[in-house]
């Protein structure tokens, strides 16, 4: 991920509703959620959630697909992993304790198997 893409991702995530949407979609898994269900879970109007979904899709952090009459959104796990890698890329230079801390943490997934696919330290 280059710096321009990272900035676009951070800009998209810097709003409370959008961050909550991404977190909800990560938990929902690869099947994703319909836009109406996302609006219901977020407690916002469909037009409001639509605005936020467009911003997140434009940043590449989520993807959309049409299923019958619904539009379903899902987290782009590759883009999210790239963002984490971008953050961690230079963190350990001269600071081995940071890397040890990251490796010891329970991580975001709760299981080593689920997080093991993402190598956050280059």
Image: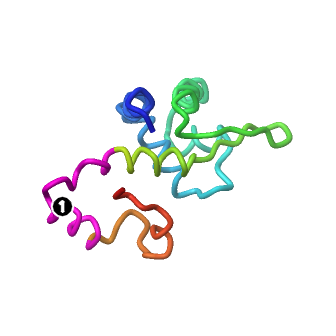
Side of 49 relative to 97 (left or right): right
Residue range highlighted in magenta: 87-104
Name the residue beneath numbered marker 1: 98
Indicate the quadrant where residue 51 lies. Answer: top right
Q: Give the camera-side residue of 106 and 95.
A: 95
Residue 29 lies, with reference to residue 14, above or below; the image says below
Q: Main secondary structure of the magenta part?
A: helix
Q: Where does the image place residue 18, in percent across and percent down from the top left?
A: 45, 35
Q: Which residue is depicted at the point 40% across and 34% down? A: 6
Q: Give the camera-side residue of 78 and 20.
A: 78
Q: In which quarter of the image is the N terminus?
A: top left
Q: Give the camera-side residue of 47 and 26.
A: 26
Q: Where does the image place residue 66, in percent across and percent down from the top left?
A: 79, 38
The answer to if 8 sits in the magenta stretch is no
Indicate the quadrant where residue 12 lies. Answer: top left
Per the image, label 1 sits on a secondary structure element best described as: helix
Q: Where does the image place residue 21, in percent across and percent down from the top left?
A: 49, 42
Q: Give the camera-side residue of 33 and 43.
A: 33
The answer to if 96 sits in the magenta stretch is yes
Q: Which residue is depicted at the point 54% across and 49% down? A: 78
């Amino acid at each position: 991920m280059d710096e321009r893409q990272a900035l676009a991702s951070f800009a998209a995530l810097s709003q409370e509703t959008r961050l909550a949407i991404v977190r909800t979609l990560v938990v929902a898994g690869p099947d994703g959620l319909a836009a109406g269900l996302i609006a219901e879970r977020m407690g916002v109007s469909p037009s409001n959630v639509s605005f936020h979904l467009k911003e997140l899709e434009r940043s590449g952090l989520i993807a959309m697909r049409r299923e019958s009459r619904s539009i379903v959104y899902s987290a782009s796990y590759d883009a999210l992993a790239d963002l984490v890698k971008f953050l961690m890329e230079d963190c350990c230079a001269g600071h081995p304790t940071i890397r040890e801390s990251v490796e010891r943490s329970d991580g975001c997934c709760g299981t080593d198997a689920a997080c093991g696919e993402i190598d956050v330290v280059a």
